[in-house]
Image: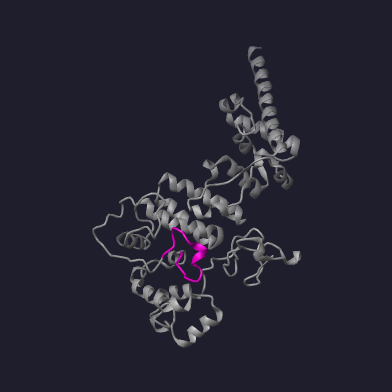
Amino acid sequence: MICKNCNKKVNYEDKFCVNCGYKLENRGDLVPLNKTLLEPKNKIHSIFRNKWITKFLNLFYIPNSKKESNNILISDKKEIEKLEQTNNILQINKCENYALNISDNSKYFQYIPKNILELLWIKDYNDYQILEGEPSLIDFELDILESKNIDSNEKIGYYPSYRKLTPEQRFVYLNWLKDITKPIDIGYVFIFYYGLERHLLFGEFEKAFDTIMILRKYHFNKSFLSYSENALLASIIKRDRLDYINKLNLSKSNINIFALIISKAFKKFMAEDLILFSTRVGFSNKRYIKEDYNRFVNEMKNILIQEYEEEYYPINEEYFLHCQKTFSLMLANTLLCNELIEFPDILSSPKVSVDIYNLLYKTHERIKSIKKEERKSQKA
């Protein structure tokens, strides 16, 4: 399909055009495209990675001698004419005023590291409707007031946003962005994190992923750790970035997402994995698992070799087609809840469930038989 606004290729399930940001409110906004051209490609970087945000970065990260202007948005006649022709940055009637607002507030962004600055979502009047309500969105028209008396650990409330902050709190937030490892009320962390979730799904995946990992290392709020783990795992699957699995500790993850990621990434379940899934597949007799876990694992490996010629249970892609259940992961940024697809529950696939149960049962019976022989030999 192609977007009727810019005539560029988009996917049928997209909510917005990945090229121009046009909101695809109904299927009439899409025009059929030859099916041979509908091969999946990488998702876009943010619609805000445009010329004006580049100038915003350049304001702080190129030598003064090379800066085109103190204002981020150039307002000379040639630039205005170009804006009028392309109509891809800001509405011209608001361009100059907004540039001045950015220039006035630039001192609060001056020492934010470039890798953090690149991940911020900044209000762009031309495309604001796309991110209307985005809690992490920074609006340069909102006041910022420097204050030394405000407590950075003072709670700022449930589901905070940059817009809801007081001018003094905005100063605290922007000051914290200079070093995101410093302790601060978790509400400020969430404001930044909401934007990182958006990047995980539609923007700078790698940068956002690594930044969230840093936040998880220094901020231990249970709610934040839970939401961020969900988002990292969901984005790995949605963006098909299974190469990032090793960056996470999956041992404490939700059993459904653990099974899905392991099966997608490695196409197999090891003996230890199968034991972990025992409750899910209805196997309740865990006596020998508890009494001698290592022995149970070793005997299961022997049975796997006998039945599959390998020490693991192989996963075929067709198993995913027969899953009877799906599951989804909760994100912190409520604006993104509709963007997540449901994931197949591989353990609800009848064949997988029955096979795992049978392997557990056979292992149990084998150990039971071995122990019986051991008792006989001891009596003899």
**Residue 241 visible here:** no
Asked whether 61 falls inside the magenta stretch, the response is no
**Residue 109 visible here:** yes
Left/right placement of residue 343 relative to residue 224 reads: right
Asked whether 135 falls inside the magenta stretch, the response is yes
Q: Quadrant of the C terminus?
A: top right
Residue plotted at (60% across, 26% down): 286
Q: Position of residue 203 (x, y in %)?
A: 54, 63
Tell me the chief SS of the magenta region. loop
Q: Quadrant of the N terminus?
A: bottom right
Q: Position of residue 181 (x, y in %)?
A: 38, 56
Classify residue 176 by image quadrant. bottom left
Q: Position of residue 152 (x, y in %)?
A: 30, 55
Front residue (pair 26, 367):
26
Q: Which residues are magenta?
A: 121-138
Residue plotted at (72% across, 65% down): 32
Left/right placement of residue 207 relative to residue 276 reads: left
Front residue (pair 88, 269):
88
